[in-house]
Image: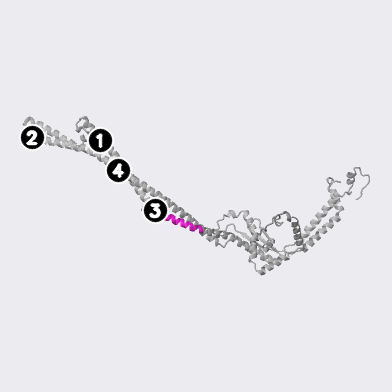
């Protein structure tokens, strides 16, 4: 029979044949479990429950609640709880009496089984000690040995091995359990671990905040000096240039420049009109036409009145000349009045023509004066803009330095308050109490494990012997093994 021929019937027959062996190993497993259980020290378990509040009660803690709610946060806090830093903080806070009681409880859990496990580990370590440079005392190095100071007490390493941290599923509660041979030590250490963790958690917030506070304080001194220097440069420039309100002054001068530009445009238009009028007058003079035909003279009301008067006097003179002699007083009077009228007409025409020439000269002079004034005003505005730009640069330096200083001051105030905070987002829900019954070893559990192991070992050994040690269990074994039909009856 081979392993490929193994059927359920054969397995049943093999197990029935070795039932005594299976029974012996079953009982042996129970006995071993009882012996091991009797040698194991009784360990008491005390549990302290911690609650993590994701909406931090610290008013200065700006951490996002979504970040705190991540699973990695709880895992991180579990790592901190089980760290040697927390254990070292506990050891440093213990009195001599408490350390003595704690060490006694630690030594009390030593048993024959634990010593055997320790000796086995040491044996295997010694076998592979030479493969590692550190284990072999830095083999090949003939100089001094590198010395590394241990930052943790040996007791801190020991107490960490009996700590058990269990996050409660679908909650923010974490159970901190401690095992000890002494029920009082178990409760005492569970509470100590919780309190030490809360202190460590708080210091992880306050210590960086204090370091930031010191750094911000140093930076604030430099920023204050920069702000004072920038303000001094601005004040010095304003005093030097006599500037009080740069913005108002440049606005006023710019308005004046716009007004001059408007006046210059009007003066240029007036000059063009006057020059056009003078050109028309010159054209009339050159053509030899009577000046009275010139439009400004022709439309002048004084000229029209004088011309009307002349026509009237000429008419009277013609009428009087027909009936009176040339030396008649009336004729002489009319001639005298006519001469005076014509003289007034010439004077009025001359006054109009002189006015046209003078108007052109005055328009040109006004345009020149306004152009010079505008050029001067433009230079003044450009100068003011240059001063304004310089002041703006200095003002921006002051504003930037002030903004940086204020921001740093706010950060300093925040970190100063944060470094003095005494609240964390973790609190103790239940303190550990002294347990009445030991938690380990569990006699029923160990016996069940021993019984199951013994039964499994017995079945395994029976199957091994049945497969690899050839025996006849049924007539099928004879038929398959010999290859001929069975003629007789097999009793088994």
Between discs 2 and 3, the one toward the N terminus:
3
Q: Position of residue 398 (x, y in %)?
A: 44, 54
Assess disc 2: are there few (<14), some (14-19) or many (≥20) residues with their C-alpha within 10 Å of its C-alpha: some
**Quadrant of the rendered image containing residue 121:** bottom right
Of pointers 4 and 3, the one earlier in the residue sequence = 3
Label 2, on which residue? 332
- The magenta-colored residue range is 218-234
The residue carrying mark 4 is 370
Residue 233 lies in magenta, yes or no? yes
Earlier-in-chain disc, 2 versus 1: 1
Numbered disc 1: secondary structure? helix
Q: Is residue 68 visible?
A: yes
Dot 2 falls on a residue whose secondary structure is helix
* Structural distance between the alpha carbons of marks 4 and 1: 22 Å
Q: Which mark is residue 277?
A: 1
Which of the marked residues, 4 or 1, is nearer the chain's N terminus?
Answer: 1
Residue bearing mark 3: 237
Query: Marks 1 and 3, how far apart in space?
Result: 54 Å
For the residues bearing labels 2 and 1, Cβ distance under 8 angstroms = no
The dominant secondary structure in magenta is helix
How dense is the environment of label 1, judged by Cα within 10 Å: few (below 14), some, or many (20 and up)?
Answer: some
Disc 2 and disc 1: Cα gap in Å? Answer: 40 Å
The image quadrant that residue 109 belongs to is bottom right
Q: Give the foreground label among 2 and 4.
A: 4
**Residue at the image point whose x is 35% and y is 45% from the top:** 379
In depth, the one of 257 and 295 nearer the eye is 257
Q: How far apart in space, not on screen, are marks 2 and 4 (Cα)?
A: 56 Å
| Mark 4: secondary structure | helix
């Amino acid at each position: 029979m081979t392993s490929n021929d193994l059927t359920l019937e054969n397995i049943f027959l093999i197990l029935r044949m070795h039932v005594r062996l299976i029974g012996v190993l079953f009982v042996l497993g129970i006995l071993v479990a009882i012996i091991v259980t009797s040698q194991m020290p009784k360990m008491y378990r005390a549990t302290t429950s911690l609650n993590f509040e994701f909406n931090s009660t610290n008013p200065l803690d700006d951490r996002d609640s979504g970040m705190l709610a991540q699973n990695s946060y709880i895992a991180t806090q579990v790592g901190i709880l089980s760290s040697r830093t927390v254990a070292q903080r506990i050891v440093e806070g213990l009195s001599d009496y408490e350390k003595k009681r704690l060490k006694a409880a630690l030594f009390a859990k030593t048993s024959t089984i634990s010593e055997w496990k320790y000796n086995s580990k040491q044996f295997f370590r010694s076998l592979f000690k030479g493969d590692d440079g550190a284990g072999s005392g830095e083999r090949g190095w003939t100089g001094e040995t590198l010395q590394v100071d241990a930052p943790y007490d040996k007791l801190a390493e020991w107490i960490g091995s009996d700590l058990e941290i269990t996050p409660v599923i679908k909650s923010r509660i974490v159970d901190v359990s401690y095992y000890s041979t002494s029920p009082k030590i178990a409760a005492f250490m569970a509470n100590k671990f919780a309190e030490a963790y809360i202190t460590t958690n708080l210091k992880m917030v306050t210590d960086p905040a204090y370091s930031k506070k010191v750094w911000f304080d140093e930076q604030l001194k430099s920023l204050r000096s920069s702000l004072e220097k920038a303000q001094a440069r601005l004040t010095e420039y304003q005093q030097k240039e006599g500037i009080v309100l740069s913005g108002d002054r440049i606005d006023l001068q710019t308005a004046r420049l716009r007004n001059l530009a408007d006046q210059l445009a009007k003066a240029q238009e007036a000059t063009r009109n006057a020059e056009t009028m003078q050109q028309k007058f010159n054209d009339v003079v050159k053509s030899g036409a009577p000046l009275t035909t010139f439009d400004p003279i022709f439309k002048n009301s004084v000229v029209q009145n004088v011309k009307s008067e002349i026509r009237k006097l000429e008419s009277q003179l013609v009428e009087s000349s027909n009936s009176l002699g040339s030396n008649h007083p009336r004729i002489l009077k009319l001639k005298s009045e006519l001469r005076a009228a014509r003289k007034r007409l010439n004077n009025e025409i001359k006054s109009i023509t002189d006015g046209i020439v003078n108007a052109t000269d005055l328009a040109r002079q006004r345009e020149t004066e306004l152009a010079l004034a505008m050029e001067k005003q433009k230079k003044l505005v450009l100068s003011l803009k240059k001063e304004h730009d310089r002041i703006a640069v200095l003002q921006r330096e002051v504003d930037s330095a002030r903004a940086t200083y204020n921001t740093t001051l706010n950060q300093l105030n925040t970190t100063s308050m944060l470094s003095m905070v005494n609240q964390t987002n973790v609190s103790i829900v239940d303190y550990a109490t002294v347990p009445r019954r030991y938690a380990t070893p569990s006699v029923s559990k160990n016996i069940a494990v021993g019984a199951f192991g013994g039964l499994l070992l017995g079945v395994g050994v029976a199957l091994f012997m049945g497969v690899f040690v050839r025996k006849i269990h049924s007539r099928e074994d004879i038929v398959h093994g010999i290859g001929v039909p069975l003629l007789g009856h097999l009793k088994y």
